[in-house]
Image (tube, grey):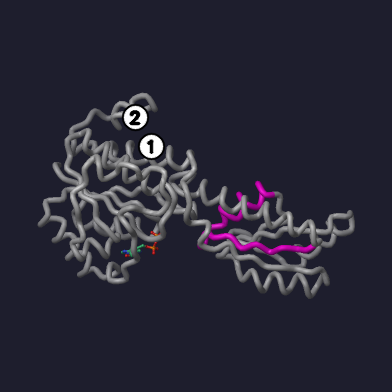
Amino acid sequence: MKRIAVLTSGGDAPGMNAAIRAVVRKAMFHGLEVYGIQYGYAGLLKKDIKKMELGSVGDIIQRGGTSLYTARCKEFFQHEVRVEAVKILKELGIDGLVVIGGDGSYRGALELTKLGVPCIGIPGTIDNDILGTEFTIGFDTALNTAIEAIDKIRDTAMSHERTYVIEVMGRNCGDLAIWAGVTAGAETVIIPERKSDINETVAKIVRGHERGKKHSIIIVAEGAGNAFEVGKQIEERTGYETRVTVLGHVQRGGTPSAMDRMLATRFGNNLVYYGFEEALRLEPHVDLGLAKLCDELSI
Ligand code: ADP
């Protein structure tokens, strides 16, 4: 194995840049050439590929988004298109591909692997919906963004004695809602993984009012229903003034937290090692440990 490529795909997540940086540095440490594919699978099909050097990943660790850009690519669902992608990779002499993205990007990577291109997936998504890892890159930053916003809304909720329904992201996964709800002190969380009953939610809010708490925060995961409908139902049934805020894409951007930068760095470092271990004829190992990680990333 001499040459690998890296791409970011699907929804961006803070910390993707730290992962790109680690992949490039680690691969170069082992004498590999690294190519960066811009705009995910769409860029691969257009051969939007550039050689990466150490300088290509300088000054990016602290930035949100992805310096390789990202895209969604409908054509990639077609077998013939993926065969074309494999042909392009082979023409360019690329022996392995690192895909940084969410579950959809992983599915694409799996299909490419089946067609003979070894792929490594690095879980980069704020949704925390990838099996096999406790946390995905971007989740911690998104969570902190969400609770900062919820804390601010709580000030207004308290001052005006209102109920606020706040929708957080997460696609079909309720992790962001649960973590935000628990750490921001919400009355309840409405998530796809649990059947929710509007009567119970209303009863909780009413119980709070009866013991003197005149404001409430309800967190709704985007995959669990319509926050505006929840707000309408609450206001109609309780008569309490209720407002709805959808936090939206503010949760996707921003400076990655230290935890996300470290997680991304460790994923980049360890996964290049594990994924291409055989091809690189490396000694098998259990865990690199942080001191070794610093050596291998030339830190
Ligand atoms: P994420 O990776 O953030 O979950 P998406 O679900 O939009 O984002 O997936 C990103 C891209 O991965 C899609 O636009 C498509 O190109 C590719 N992809 C997703 N699912 C598949 C699949 N089943 N087969 C092949 N490619 C897929």
Point out the stretch of residues depicted in magenta.
162-184
Which residue is disc 1 drawn over? 266
Three-letter amino acid code at disc 2? Answer: Leu
Indicate which quadrant contains ligand 1.
bottom left
Which residue is disc 2 drawn over? 293
Tell me the residue at 59%/53% (across/down).
146
Q: Nearer the viewer, residue 58 or 52?
A: 58
Residue 82 sits above or below residue 270 on the image: below
Q: Find numbered disc 1 in the image and state the secondary structure of the residue it sits on.
A: helix
Does residue 158 show up magenta in the picture? no
Does residue 172 show up magenta in the picture? yes
Which residue appears farthest toward the top when viewing the image? 291
Answer left or right for 289 relative to 47.
right
Q: Nearer the viewer, residue 200 or 210?
A: 210
**For the residue carrying disc 2, how many other residues have a C-alpha within 10 Å: few (<14), some (14-19), or many (20+)?**
some
Task: Give the percent coordinates (x, y) of residue 96.
Answer: 21, 48
Answer left or right for 214 relative to 111.
right
Tell me the residue at 52%/51% (across/down).
142
Residue 25 sits above or below residue 36 on the image: above
Contact (CB < 8 A) between labels 2 and 1? yes
Tell me the residue at 22%/33% (across/down).
29
Three-letter amino acid code at disc 1? Answer: Arg
